[in-house]
Image (spheres, rainbow, N blue to C red):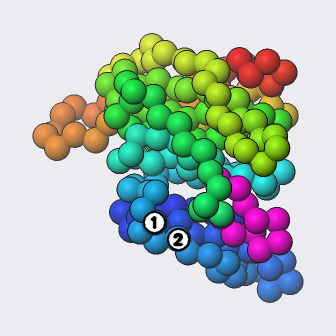
Amino acid sequence: LACVNVLGNAIHVYRFDPGERSLIAVQTIRDAPMFRKPENISSSPDGSHVAITDMAAADLKILRIDPGSHEILLDDHATVKHPKDRTAHGVAYSRCGRFVAHTTVDRSGVVRVYRVVDEGGRIEVLPFQVLENEHYPLVPKGIDFARDGSRVALCYGPNVQREKRPARVGRLEIRAFDARHGI
């Protein structure tokens, strides 16, 4: 189990002990220079990588997981940043593990889909598809893929505002996902 603490600028990794029915701390990454505000995390289905969005850096990082210790390896990663994005928020690996998608909560609020390639020991994250937001002022916050990989769920909500405004409802959208082609 891996989770982030955005305000604490930390990432925590735990191992589940089924006999004790408890979590055992494996790793804590705190104030690593490569992270400014880690926002969300998703592990690949085979457990070999994690995808982490960084709200302040407005980027997506793909990092390897050590197969023995299950620790996240900071020295071997790929980072992608789109020049138009000011934020990166929700993130999810597709169930086939070949694609990762993340949301942005910028004014435009898009969903970006990338192909993840790890051949020859080098991770590549290739831009693949952009899903434009049709629901502004709601923006895509969360994303996840169905267990069978055929659908993707997108959660939309308003961004936090300092001044009081009328309440806006959110939106849950379920879309088909073609895992063969990543669309």
Residue tagged 1 = 32
In this view of the protein, which residue sits in the foreground, 118 or 67? 118
Q: Would residue 98 be counted in the magenta stretch?
A: no
* Residue at image point 55% right, 18% down: 130
Q: Are marks 1 and 2 in contact (CB under 8 Å)?
A: yes
Residue under the image location 60 percent in, 45 percent down: 78
Q: What label sits on residue 140 in the rendered view? A: none
Examine the image and state in which quarter residue 1 appears.
bottom right
Q: Residue at x 79, y 55 (%)?
A: 47
Q: Residue furthest bottom?
A: 20
Q: Amino acid at mark 2?
A: Ile
Where is residue 172? Give x, y as percent: 55, 29
Residue 147 visible at all: no
Of all residues shown, which one is farthest toward the left?
163
Q: Position of residue 65 (x, y in %)?
A: 73, 60
Q: Is residue 116 left or right of residue 169?
A: right
Q: Position of residue 60 (x, y in %)?
A: 53, 42
What whole-number distance in Å separates the C-alpha atoms at marks 1 and 2? 7 Å
Q: Secondary structure at mark 2?
A: strand
Q: Is residue 103 visible?
A: yes
Amino acid under disc 1: Ala
Local SS, label 1: loop
55 shown above or below 117 = below
Judge whether 25 appears above or below 111 on screen: below
Q: Main secondary structure of the magenta part?
A: loop
93 in relation to 171, above or below: below
Residue at image mark 2 = 29
Q: Give neighbour class at mark 1: few <14, some 14-19, many 20+ (Cα, 10 Å).
A: few
Nearer to us: label 1 or label 2: 1
x, y percent for residue 48? 78, 54
Give the magenta-colored segment's residue range: 63-72
Q: How many marks?
A: 2
